[in-house]
Image: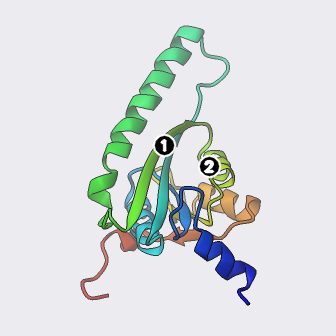
């Protein structure tokens, strides 16, 4: 008799793929590239949802500035998301990669995506572009404190693995 886990594995995810779904936080940093490389390897026969979040303009700016800042955030997000194919060494026949640009704080956008898409895990770089001192960045820390899913925190060195490793 098959247990619940094997029955779930046989059923696949929502789009019929048998492998896992992993949400990846993306800011173009080496740590994010490492998270993407790692996620695409782990999600064999599944999908990777790459999310770039851009925060909304502060409430005290004028509506015209808000529009300009939102347009700039969306444009920067699209430019960063365009880097994904080159950053991933995934065999695209073995994993499906989706890219999304979302408004809001990065941790919130990743948590929302993971919940809405039934992701099995979330992968992020250990330190993003805005990283200050510390072992893990603020997004990694917020995810670890807020989610019921595994969080994979990947160091920048994973973006450039040692050959044969």
Quadrant housing residue 143: bottom right
N-terminal of the pair, mark 1 or mark 2, is 1
Q: Residue at x 61, y 75 (%)?
A: 9
Q: Are marks 1 and 2 in contact (CB under 8 Å)?
A: yes
Quadrant housing residue 90: bottom left
The residue closer to the viewer here, 32 or 21, is: 21
* Residue annotated with mark 2: 113
Q: Residue at x 38, y 36 (%)?
A: 78
Q: Residue at x 42, y 67 (%)?
A: 40
Q: Residue furthest front?
A: 1
- Decide if residue 135 is in sight here: no
The residue closer to the viewer here, 23 or 129, is: 23
**Placement of the N terminus among the 4 image quadrants:** bottom right
- Residue 100's disc is 1
Q: Separation of disc 1 and disc 2 at Cα?
A: 9 Å
Neighbour class for label 1 at 10 Å: few (<14), some, many (≥20)?
Answer: some
Neighbour class for label 2 at 10 Å: few (<14), some, many (≥20)?
Answer: many
Relative side of 88 to 107, left or right: left
Residue 99, x across and y down, in percent? 44, 47
Q: Secondary structure at mark 1?
A: strand
- Residue 8's disc is none
Counting labels gives: 2
Q: Residue at x 33, y 64 (%)?
A: 93
Relative side of 95 to 5, left or right: left
Relative side of 87 to 119, left or right: left
């Amino acid at each position: 008799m098959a247990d619940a886990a094997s029955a779930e594995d046989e059923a696949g995810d929502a789009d019929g793929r048998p492998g896992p779904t992993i949400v990846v936080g993306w800011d173009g940093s080496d740590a994010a590239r490492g998270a993407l490389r790692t996620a695409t390897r782990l999600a064999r026969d599944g999908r990777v949802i790459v999310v770039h979040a851009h925060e909304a303009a502060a409430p005290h700016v004028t509506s015209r500035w808000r529009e300009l800042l939102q347009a700039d955030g969306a444009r920067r997000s699209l430019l960063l998301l365009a880097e994904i194919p080159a950053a991933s060494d995934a065999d695209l026949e073995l994993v499906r990669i989706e890219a999304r640009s979302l408004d809001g704080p990065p941790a919130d956008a990743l948590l929302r995506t993971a919940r809405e898409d039934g992701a099995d895990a979330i992968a992020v770089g250990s330190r993003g572009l805005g990283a200050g001192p510390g072992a893990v960045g603020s997004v990694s820390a917020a995810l670890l404190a807020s989610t019921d899913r595994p969080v994979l925190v990947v160091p920048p060195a994973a973006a450039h693995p040692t050959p044969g490793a």
